[in-house]
Image (cartoon, rainbow, N blue to C red):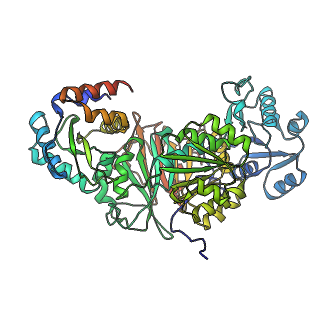
Amino acid sequence: MKIGEILTETMVLAQLSAADKEGVLTELASHLHAHAADVPGGAQDVLRALIDRERLGSTGVGEGVAIPHAKIPGLNRLVACFGRAIQGIAFDSIDQQPVRLFFVLLVPENSAGAHLKALARISRLLKDSSFRKTLLEFPDQAAIYNGFLEEDDKY
Amino acid sequence: MQGLEYRNSKRLFWHDQSLAPRSAPLHCSPMQIVIVGAGVVGTALAEQLSHEGHQVSVIDRDRHKVRELSEKLDVLGVHGNAAMPSVLRRAGIQEAQMVIAVTDVDEVNVIVGMMAMRLGVEHRIVRIRNSEYLDENCIISPQELGIEHVINPEPAIVDALVRMIEIPGSVDVATLAGGQVLMLGFDIEEDSPAAGKTTAELREVSDLDSFLFIDIMRGDEVIVPKGNDRILPGDNVHILVAEGTVPFLLPIIHRQRRQTARVILLGASRIGVELAKAMEGRVERMVLIEPDPGLAEEAASVLKKTTVLQGEGTDLEVLEEASIGTCDLFCAVSDNDQRNMLAALLARKHGAKKEAVLVHQPEFVPVLDSLGVEIVINPRLVTVSEALMHVRRGLVHSVTRLAGSRGEILEIEAQPGSRVVGAPLKALNFPKNALVGAIVRDDIMQIPTGDTIIQPGERVVVYALQEAIAAIEKLFAGTSRDGLPMR
């Protein structure tokens, strides 16, 4: 499982403008809906699925990282979106730290475990503190995207 | 004066099926087994294996031990030096299918292994504790010495401690299915996001994130959750989880992260040094206390990011110097049981949040348990467990007994022709008090549903209360060569 298989450059947002948890999820859901034609339903449906997942436990895994994810009925592939919020967003993270890096993963209903490989891959990449630091320093969308591909090649 | 307070937390009881012999024999044909060394490990193995119906003989140089053992168990006791061919012959080595050499002396164990190979004994399990015989600088490799399996509990102990440090808040860790699946134990606190929810309510997330509550311990009661069981504060739960999704599970269990950032180790034993090597640089602070100046110096030369203090672990000044007041985990892993226990109790009194204590004498395990020490490690019981895994190389790959629960986790290979394969799980008359926890397919842990069909040869993680184990074993066993179902 390579990050390039699930993330495209369009799906990278260099600066999220939202100010709170729901705002960030709304912004990411809208972007996913607008740029992945095969995501069924409206942006609202994506948002609801993500919020439902958050309700049972934050996906803020600590160190300024959140990996919101949810099953989307009718979806046929894994769809990912990365967003950066330099300002930091309160996200009920387990370490109480504001989140700056968001990696969203939409999962088909019959994923049969492929999403687990993706989730494990994403958390592994974002576990590296120097990579997290560089992600915050990249100037734009293209640099962030290439940064992901390069980092992914190291493993 | 302030006494030692009892803390209301569960400890990790070293996972082991050997704490009490199992009554249900496992599915492997009876063998003739020679056990060399009637120490703690040899005795426990003799007890377990003779219980399971194997023909066991035990050799030891202590006449009293041999007599005691042969009076207590249905085994042949042989007195003498096992490195002597005549002694091995008296124990019936020529007819044996397996030799397990677990004396306190590595060299004796090695010689027994070599002679057993020469005599054509099929399985040769040898304990070697000194890593010089095992690492790349060894002159003759264990394979060249005729050893089939080396048992050495230290790597497993280091691995479990590393995981406990890495997975904050866990009070219990076991690795299953070659690392794909973890079994974790947690205490549910008042503010836990999972508290008050039923396992059915968590099901959507737990399916997505690949974890499963396998039991809930509430006081003396053990609940195998079937959907409508509610998780309550004060419960101790066991969860199976895919290795990669642990980070998503933790926020569901704890509102806030339990950090294990500051660790103090007592004892530059092999375990102490290996643990420091594995964790230094990954935790905020690592301090190693070692009384022996030579060992302390040696440890300091190989550890780059660990502060090595030469001094007694029971010396308050030394503990203060190690900043005991802000210590998250105090690991007493020296070779001296009494020192470990005393130091850990002192560490707790002076502010350590959690203690792990290594004791060689199994008799100390319940004592530490009653004192509320969270993590108790007994290397000999781990050795027994390792040896048994090699004995049961057939159907059952591993057995993990859970702390304080009557539950066991079995890794079982579904045999072709067994009743468990080919039909959806919901169509099977699966024993009450048991559940299929996980299946590993394409290197990914999957949580089975009622529609899941287990394939022949697939490795399945099953949770079962003890009373259900015999039924589970029947369900997974194929038919024996003569066409009769195996017991």
Which of the image's four quarters has the N terminus of chain B?
Answer: bottom right
Rendered location of residue B186, percent (x, y) = 45, 58
Q: Is residue B446 visible?
A: yes
Say which residue appears at 60% left-offset and 60% top-offset.
B347
Say which residue appears at 66% left-offset and 25% top-offset.
B136
Q: How many marks?
A: 0
* The one of B388 and A38 positioned closer to us in this rendering: A38
* The one of B213 and A126 positioned closer to us in this rendering: A126
Rendered location of residue B365, percent (x, y) = 66, 60
* The one of A35 and B6 positioned closer to us in this rendering: B6
Please, is residue B233 above or below residue B480 in the view? below
Please, is residue B34 above or below residue B353 in the view? above
Q: What residue occupies the far bottom of the structure in this picture? A: B1
Say which residue appears at 55% left-offset and 41% top-offset.
B479
Q: Is residue B342 left or right of residue B444?
A: right
Rendered location of residue B346, percent (x, y) = 63, 63
Please, is residue A47 above or below residue B319 in the view? above
Query: Image quadrant of residue B81?
Result: top right
Q: Is residue B447 visible?
A: no
Rendered location of residue B315, percent (x, y) = 68, 58
Query: Image quadrant of residue B277?
Result: top right
